[in-house]
Amino acid sequence: KSSHTLIFITIFHFFRLGSESDYFEASNKLNNCLRFFPDRSDKADNNPVICVSKGEKLVAAIEVHGKSIVQASGYSNRPLEYDPYLYKAYTIWRKKYNLHEGRQ
């Protein structure tokens, strides 16, 4: 099991968005509405948007509020389950940080 976890961590990279330009760029690459988010750098500690990349390609965005994930989606807001490897990596990441799906 631990070797599988290492593979998923190696393939997918989870990182926070920071500046307005980060949101705009992620929105363009993922074809979603992140470009309409205001500059959220002041809220990044409690309500970050986490992006997921696979190599050089951005593959998902995760909106976090406190300890809850309010939205997690791939390109054009597709459910993460469309890519079983991405969904597995997301699940491992979510559990590692004790995050819950939906507003709590």
Image: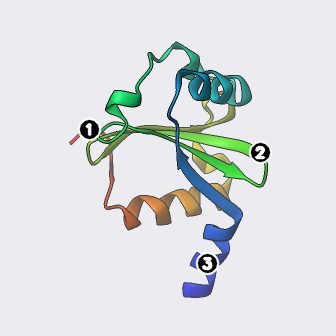
Name the residue type under label 3.
Leu
Check the image and report above or below for 53 versus 39: below
Q: Amino acid at mark 2?
A: Lys
Q: CA distance from mark 3 to mark 2?
A: 19 Å
Query: Extreme right residue here?
Result: 56
Is residue 1 visible from the viewing direction of this image?
A: no
In this rendering, is residue 98 above or below 21?
below
Sequence-wise, the earlier of marks 3 and 2 is 3
Indicate the position of residue 49 as horizontal and vertical percent values: 46, 37
Q: Is residue 3 left or right of residue 57?
A: left
Q: Is residue 60 visible?
A: yes
Give coordinates of residue 68: x percent, y percent.
30, 44
Q: Secondary structure under badge 3?
A: helix
Could you say whether the residue bearing mark 1 is in a helix, strand or loop?
A: loop
Q: Which residue is mark 3?
A: 6
- Residue neighbourhood size for the residue with mark 2, other residues' Cα within 10 Å, grouped as few (<14), some (14–19), many (≥20): few
Q: Pointer 1: what residue?
A: 103
Residue for point 71% across, 23% down: 28
Amino acid type of the residue tagged 1 in the rendering = Arg
63 to the left or right of 23: left
The x, y position of residue 26, in whole percent, is: 64, 30
Q: Residue at x 62, y 86 (%)?
A: 3
Residue assigned mark 2: 57
Position of residue 40 in the picture relative to residue 79 (left or right): left
Check whether the beta carbons of the residues at disc 1 and disc 3 lie within 8 A of each other: no
Question: Which residue is at a point 33% across and 54% down the rendered structure image?
Answer: 99
